[in-house]
Image (cartoon, coloured by chain):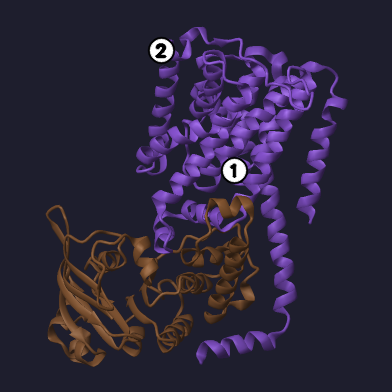
Chain colours: A brown, B purple
Amino acid sequence: MLELTSVTKRFGGLVAVNNISASFERATINAIIGPNGAGKTTFFNLISGAMPLSDGRIVIDGCDVTGLRADQMARIGVARTFQATTLFDNATVLDNLIVGHRLRTKSNLLDVIFGTHRLRDEEAACRRKAREALDFVGLAHVEARLAGDISQEERKRVAFALALATDPALLLLDEPAGGVNPEETAGLADLIRKMKSSGLTICLIEHKMDMIMNLADKILVLNYGEKIAEGTPAEVRANPAVIEAYLGSEHAHA
Amino acid sequence: MNAKLGWSALLVLGLAFPFMAGNDYHLTVMSTAYIYAIATVGLNLITGYTGQFNLAHSGFMAVGAYTVGILTVDYQMPFWLAFALSGVVAAGIGFFVGLVSLRLKTHFFSIFTMCVGYIMFLLIEKWDSLTHGTGGIVGIPAPESIFGLDFSEPRTQYYLVLLFLALSMWIMHRIVNSLLGRTFVAIRNGDDLAQALGINLMRNKLLAFMLSVFFAGLAGGLYAGYVRFLGPDLARVEHTFDMTMYMLVGGIGTMAGPLLGAIGMPWVTQQLQFLQDYRFVVFGPLLVALVIFLPHGIVGTWMARQKRKAAQQQATTQATPPVRLATNKGARRA
């Protein structure tokens, strides 16, 4: 569903992402791995429209979406999470999620001033969507808690819920299991599988190899902004370039 | 419905004030405070709710005031017609200022708008043929009477200003609690996340900016009809700093905070008048202490505490059945 052709990003003389082509199938989990500074987050920023491409093409479901802004990409159905999610800590979790469905609503200033039916219906729809998303990530019981009071793992799940509330088809997760313990990591991996089985296409950046190797259908390995390998976990694990660049010598002997 | 009760009590107090006030001077202080409250509530929309700290706000208040002044004195336009234009003209100029300045973020935006505010002040001061320059505009007519209400009389003036303050609060309440208000708060929380949620940053920031300066223009229009004399000093950045102080003391990004700050602070400064030039020696440290210990202002701190209490109550009523938690965990594994 997502097709990248020679995607490139240059910052002055530095090539952060160099000539990467890849395609991701619908309802699959795709991992992007690589050492620190390999260009993974920049790669995400390009797909999500947060940064303009220097070169290349992005096609989603046969539509050329190259050069669209992040908010336009979100409307098309590309949602993303960030390494750190900034929530409004003084509001409840549910209140934080309601705005997630805003992009599917049409109410404007006049609706607000005159208090129209459309506004009321859409606000109800946003609230419903927020609950649905919260339920999906298994946090229905924290909806009334303040966002500042929930745990790190719950914050990660709320970030997922916020992305899900936008009705995405493609979900980009930037280190979804960063900073949570191994048991919680397993829980998050289950949640990501659940998203896949609901039909979402998922791309994720992650450093936790155990999680990736169990989870991903396909792995893309970046190093110094270039794609050095691509394939199933087994293929990538056996790839000598990857072992040398990233996984380290102990894996090579294993 | 605690909030409704509080707002009604405030309104009743506002309505009853002229009967409690000792003299016309108190009415004047209060009416002026209300006018600045309208502008402050507007500033709170862009600064408190949308997170873009605009320092040109008093410039836009002056634009509204001079719209009324110039149109009524030089073009003999009736006050009400000119007044209707005051907010529109401010928002119109706000469109162009916003279009340029909102390309900047955080303190760059603030510094830029401070410069814009100063340019607005200079334009008003130097453009003699349009604004009468340093001499100011004298002899602005009082609002024409409606239903036999004479708006040159302090008490009717007070109620007129109160009416517009109440209207402003009501509209602001609508905006802030709607999807639109949530959109603004999402931008305050972070540009990147807001944009990833499909929010068009420029369009929404510009809308918040124009709405914000619309209230400033309206406040300026009321000011012109109330004071009936205008000088360029109205546009000075010090007035924006005053309004910012009202917001900080009351609680930035809350509905009641800026309002109470704008109404309360003039009275506090009045009370410190006896210290003369030394009052800032007292006042300054007080303000610093407040910002350090109550960064969310008086109303903001109080509201955060209320919300925490409510959230804890919810949590204790919901957390008791362990069975429910177990099923949730089960759902995650599924």
Question: Quick one: A211 or B50, which is closer to the camera?
Answer: B50
Q: Residue at x 69, y 35 (%)?
A: B165
Residue B290 makes an appearance in the image: yes
Task: Please state, as top left, top right, bottom left or bottom right, where the N terminus of chain A lies in the image.
Answer: bottom left
Q: Where is residue B87? Give x, y as percent.
A: 54, 33
Identify the secondary structure beneath mark 2: helix
Name the residue tied to disc 1: B252
Give coordinates of residue A18: x percent, y percent: 14, 67
Q: Is residue B290 above or below residue B320?
A: above
Q: Which of the marked residues, 2 or 1, is nearer the chain's N terminus?
A: 2
Above or below, A161 against B14 in this view is: below
Discs 2, 1 touching: Cβ within 8 Å: no
Question: Which class describes the residues within 10 Å of circle 2: few (<14), some (14-19), or many (20+)?
Answer: some
Q: Is residue A112 left or right of residue B154?
A: left
Q: Secondary structure at mark 1?
A: loop
Q: Quadrant of residue A254?
A: bottom left
Q: Which mark is residue B126?
A: 2
Callouts 2 and 1 in the same chain: yes
Disc 2 marks which amino acid? Lys
Residue B281 visible in rendering: no
